[in-house]
Amino acid sequence: MDFSYGDFPILHDVNLCMDGPQLISIVGPNGVGKSTLVGCICGLLKPNKGNIEINDVDLEQYKTRDLARIIGYVPCTAKDSFPLSVTDTVLMGKGPYNGWKTTDADLKAVYNVLDLLGIRELALRNFDELSAGQHQKVMLARGIIQDTEILILDEPTANLDIKHQLEVTRLLSELVTQRNMMIIMINHDLNIAARYSDNIIILSGGTVYSIGKPEDVITAESLEAVYGVQSEIIDRNGHPYVILDDPDYSNLERHAGTLTDR
């Protein structure tokens, strides 16, 4: 699969096959096409070359509502600025099933997912009055309540502090098993990705550098090749853990010590 914005190529020779319930993290430096890739997978963008199939059916063959029952998408930042309540905002995730009709079961589902994310107290607040982190959790709730086979998340923890990054990623990992679903997320934290992901896709230069289990793809060699950084990878309870090294900073410290001694 290839994708370009006009004459500017973003993705090239991308060939992926993802199957079964699992949490997949997409990682890689800024500007390598991560958001573009998930945009193509969920049908927001159309590849210039190649095609995407879901359940052996070309993506373009699906009607919009039918596709929305299979794939849910949560963007990196919520651009919506409407004065709807959080409850009504999350209910929008039920649109592919009920249109604008709301049932008691739908409201129960909303409160269940708000409880799941620990934000029930926001239910009656207006969406456009929330903080960036609260926005992110509400949009995640809207994606979860859509109850799809595949949930695609563009940096779902981008506006969250460290504690909530861990909580949300752990929750997503649990949802894979509880709801028998595939979750694909863009993640910039390699250690969180390595801890909770079943598989990791590393993008570099607009194509797939490697794909596989965290212990197979998160290596010192791959991080140097893709990110241009030196690191040490240690084992933490069966998961790779990245310790970054910065030789330039070490040299700076030595140089500063020399100047102080003078």
Image (tube, grey):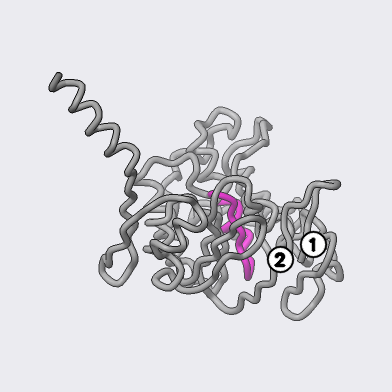
**Residue 149 in sight in this render:** yes
Q: x, y percentage for residue 187? A: 50, 53
Q: x, y percentage for residue 4? A: 80, 52
Decide if residue 171 is on the left or right side of residue 136.
Answer: left
Residue appearing at x 18%, y 27% in the figure: 257
Quarter of the image holding residue 153?
Answer: bottom right
Q: Nearer the viewer, residue 188 or 30?
A: 30
C-alpha gap between disc 1 and disc 2: 7 Å
The region drawn magenta spans 141-155
Q: Is 262 placed above or below 42 here? A: above
Residue appearing at x 60%, y 36% in the figure: 85
Q: Amino acid at mark 2?
A: Arg
The residue identified by callout 2 is 69
Residue appearing at x 79%, y 47% in the figure: 8
Q: Nearer the viewer, residue 219 or 110?
A: 219
Residue appearing at x 85%, y 47% in the figure: 7
- Residue 65 shows which numbered tag? 1
Q: Is 119 placed above or below 209 here? A: above
User: Does 246 lie within the magenta span?
Assistant: no
